[in-house]
Amino acid sequence: TLGECVVIQDDLVVLSLDWLWRDVIGWQLSPEQRGRLAGRTTGVFTIEDFQARCPCPANQALRVLQATNFCVPCDVEDDEVEYEIPCLNLVERLPGLWDPWKPCSPLLPHAGLRLLPAEAPLYHLTPIFPHLQSQLRKITQTWDPRDSDLYQWWRGSKLCVGPCESIITLEEEDQGYIEVRIRGPRGTGAQCFALLGVIFDAIDATLDIVAPALLLEKHWLSPSQLRDYDEVLHTWEPAPLLSALLDKTFDEAKFKNPFNCRQESIWEIIGCGSSLLDTCIPGTRQPVKFIKPGIQRRLAQLLDTPDPHGKDWCLLAVRLGLGDRVANLDSNVDSPTLRLLACAGPGCTVGSLVKQLRALGREDAVHLLLSYTPVFVLSMAIDSETGSNLSR
């Protein structure tokens, strides 16, 4: 008998859990071991450097660390390979990485947001952030190095593409959050918006790998204050933005910044100074079948439980025009709410779901959807059953 084992990938099986946690994960990544970095505070090692501090064969340990997203191999000159391990990167942030652009015209693209964990006492972003840095490195390895650059330090990364710049940092204020800021010269709004999409892709991929149940609220930063480089910034929570988008467009929905009294439309907040894109639609128009699995599961936790007044999945199905399917949706094996969302047609959107939940008096479910649905969705065929969809 093999006893306990861990299948990390189809072709990678760890037979000894003690070896995995003691000699690979614990030995390499424990804070107590940082004194053995031998001056390599950048977190980048050759295989010989790594073997010098590793109690087991380095090639085995590095393969496991790559498979678990702790480590990224990087090709260097003469077919040599170095290994970047972001959680061992102890480099301090260099001064001047995000110095203000003066004078800063209102025409210069600026955007930013903070990502906060939904259940701060249960999740901490500190162990997740190095995985995000690994993901950023993987993405940039496919780019032309002459037109892009990724510089990383302890709890921070600066990603530049062409003339556009972004900075991604882990901040420890309150319960901790990841902050993203993007800026670019005049006329680069579309490029900045595309760069924001790359960062969102990296964050989504990271969470899918290491914390698929984690939900992050996206609090958008005031673009006018970002251009002014104010120290204290007003943030727009997602729920008010999405509530406004139930009945208004990106340009029509405007909010007054209490810090500087300026009116800012939702597109000014999220659009990075670019022109409104035809393929960018409000998140409230996203079909419910594209709601992220983590949000669907939370919604099921709220609606699966029978309500004494009928304010549960059953009455919701009737209000959504699926009353004839209630018998088929009911199940003691899996979630009827998840079944309901899966069989809803493309005309059933997040916005229509929110309106029906409000009619039922289920403000708890409404708050869940408005807090974690993306403010905008990029899609080439959002109304197609087989169309692709990228949530933001």
Image (spheres, rainbow, N blue to C red):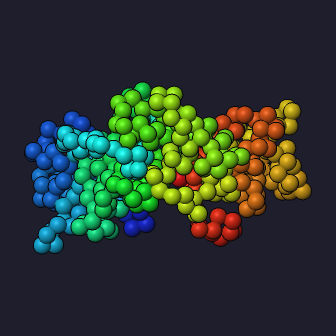
Of residues 180 and 38, the one nearer the viewer is 180
**How many numbered circles are shown?**
0
- The picture places residue 321, in percent across and down from the top left corner, at 86, 54
Of residues 279 and 199, the one nearer the viewer is 279
Whether residue 87 is visible = no
- Vertical comparison of 166 with 277: above or below: above
Of residues 261 and 146, the one nearer the viewer is 261
Residue farthest right in this picture: 324
Q: Is residue 292 left or right of residue 176?
A: right
Residue drawn at x 25%, y 49% as measured from the top left:
152
Residue drawn at x 47%, y 56% as measured from the top left:
274
- The picture places residue 56, in percent across and down from the top left corner, at 20, 54
Whether residue 177 is visible = yes
Q: Is residue 78 left or right of residue 312?
A: left
Residue farthest bottom in this picture: 78
Residue drawn at x 24%, y 44% as measured from the top left:
97
Q: Is residue 356 left or right of residue 286?
A: right
- The picture places residue 198, in percent across and down from the top left corner, at 42, 58
Q: Which quadrant of the rendered structure holds the N terminus?
A: bottom left
- The picture places residue 232, in percent across and down from the top left corner, at 39, 29
Residue farthest left in this picture: 38
Residue drawn at x 19%, y 39% as measured from the top left:
95
- Vertical comparison of 247 with 388: above or below: above
Q: Quadrant of residue 148?
A: bottom left
